[in-house]
Image (tube, helix red, strand yellow):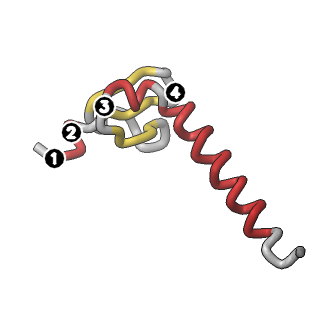
Amino acid sequence: MDDQDLKWFYNQATGQVEQGKVSSFENRMGPYDTREEAAHALDIAKARNAAADAKDEADDDWGKN
């Protein structure tokens, strides 16, 4: 058994949480350590994107003082 078989994934196509690599990689988000984390995959991705966008914006302004 592979370590990934114990991890949790969110299936974007069905909106379901799955344990292991059940679905195609095209629809799978993860891996996550818990079912709860996988259930909030879209929220986690949104927060990470917002943080990355904020960092990019800050980096763009580094020479404008």
Mark 2 / mark 4, whichever is N-terminal: 2
Is 56 left, or right, of 42 in this rendering?
right
Where is 28 relative to 49, above or below? above
Mark 1 Cα within 10 Å, few/some/many (few <14, many 20+)? few
Residue type at tag 3: Thr
Give the residue drawn at x 40%, y 39%. 24
Which amino acid is tagged 4? Ala
Q: Which mark identifies residue 5?
A: 2
Q: How far apart in space, not on screen, are marks 1 and 3 (Cα)?
A: 16 Å
Q: Amino acid at mark 1?
A: Asp
Query: Quadrant where the N terminus lies?
Result: top left
Q: Is residue 59 left or right of residue 6?
A: right
Q: Are marks 1 and 2 in contact (CB under 8 Å)?
A: yes
Up/down of 23 relative to 56, above or below: above
Q: Nearer the viewer, mark 1 or mark 3?
A: 3
- Which residue is disc 1 drawn over? 2
Residue at mark 3: 34
In three-dimensional space, the C-alpha distance between marks 1 and 4, rounded to whole angstroms, equals: 24 Å
Identified at 43% across, 25% down, the residue is 39
Residue beneath disc 4: 13
Q: Which one is in front in this view, the residue at disc 4 or the one at disc 3? A: 3
